[in-house]
Amino acid sequence: MDFFTRKRSASSAKERLQLVLVHDRTDLTPGQLESLKDDLLKAISQYIEIDPDAVRIELEKDGRSQRLVADIPLKSSSRHRAG
Amino acid sequence: MTAQVFTVTSGKGGVGKTTAVANLATALAMDGKRVVCIDGDIGLRNLDVVMGLENRIVYDIVDVIEGRCKLKQAMIRDKHYPEMYLIPAAQTRDKNAVSPSDMVRICNDLKPDADFIIIDSPAGIERGFRNAIAAADRVLVVTNPEVSAVRDADRVVGILEAEEKSNPALIINRLNPALVKNNDMLSAEDVLDLLGIRLIGIVPEDENVIIGSNRGTPIVTDAKSRAGMAFRNIARRLQGDDVPFMDLAPQSGLWNAIQRLAGRK
Ligand SMILES: Nc1ncnc2c1ncn2[C@@H]1O[C@H](COP(=O)(O)OP(=O)(O)OP(=O)(O)O)[C@@H](O)[C@H]1O
Ligand SMILES: [Mg+2]
């Protein structure tokens, strides 16, 4: 490990805990969250065209409660094609 | 007047629950309060030695529950503070010797004659933990600024929410200001931000704590100890006083030297 460029350990402790706590609190493993995302995308794609690579679906912490936040950009041409 | 019941718990073991109970109880007794401590760690009795009362034990909490003695007979009076008592845990291996309703009944019997009842919970989230929180008016969650302790504290807070024992208060114990300054330890702000509950005190790492338990004299009785000061402040907050948080910035050697020269240390 490069002692001088290494990230200080407190920040990695905090980042890792942030993730772990969200999964502990929702009782969802990272694997389950992935398949939830896949299912969501499949369901949405049946109606509108989306760009799977631009999708962002995350569990976020807000005080002691969690929310599932999804940012799903639509393909600009989707309305014409669907119509 | 009826006593308020505080339970000290943590999830993870060894973070300082028993230390906190002994010190908070002693600090409250120093403020003239009538205090009863209950050791809820059945099978791993420890509060007695930390408080220096191990030689006075005749009966324990299981003797009370099973009717071998009266509640009064199991209450051990402190050596220095006659208004402070300890009800020791039993050393039995039977984890089911105590039930949540036993704890509620014992606390109800104690309430008219005390100002504070402080219960020391065992580590974990099993039966002993359930017993310890059953009678609590308020729960104090102890953690250390360290990943596994914070994670377990979060689990406990989640269970407390589900049990509607809401509004627990957080004690961050063994904070090392020099490590925090170096960004090699989670800061109190980090821990609060992660857990999202109310803070009631930050206790620094302090070798005097161990010296205090060696002697069976909680460190709050030492006016110079930083950890003792932190526990005295928490005890005042438990009484409803608004006490500012201590400045835990690491003291440089030079600053210490000046304070010593000025006769303040
Ligand atoms: N602020 C502190 N500074 C230094 N040492 C401390 C501090 N707080 C606690 N300790 C030490 O940490 C050890 C564990 O403390 P303690 O027995 O109170 O933890 P606990 O949570 O009750 O453990 P258990 O889960 O086994 O019941 C003891 O040796 C104690 O002296
Ligand atoms: Mg203990």
Image (cartoon, coloured by chain):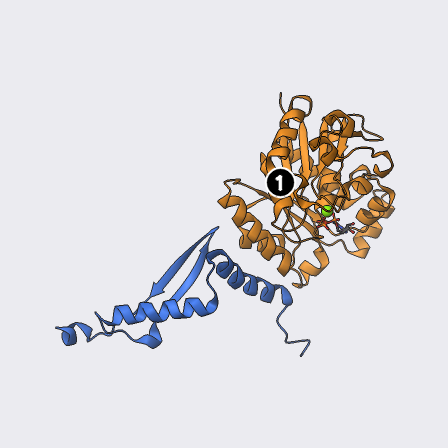
Chain colours: A blue, B orange
Residue, disc 1: B131
> Mark 1 falls on what kind of element?
helix
Tell me, yes or no, if residue B30 can be seen here.
no
State which quadrant residue B100 falls in. top right
Tell me, yes or no, if residue A3 can be seen here.
yes
Residue B245, position in %: x, y? 65, 43
All told, the count of numbered labels is 1
Residue B183, position in %: x, y? 65, 63
What's the residue at 65%, 56% (across, down)? B145
State which quadrant residue B136 falls in. top right
Q: Is residue B239 above or below residue B41?
A: above
Q: Nearer the viewer, residue B127 or A58?
A: B127
Q: Is residue B47 above or below residue A65?
A: above
Residue most toward the bottom? A2
Task: Please tell me how crowded label 1 is: few (under 14), some (14-19), or many (20+) other residues with Cα within 10 Å.
Answer: many
Tag 1, which chain? B
Quarter occupied by the N terminus of chain A:
bottom right
What's the residue at 31%, 70% (across, down)? A41
State which quadrant residue B105 falls in. top right
User: Horizontally, is B191 left or right of A70 in the view?
Assistant: right
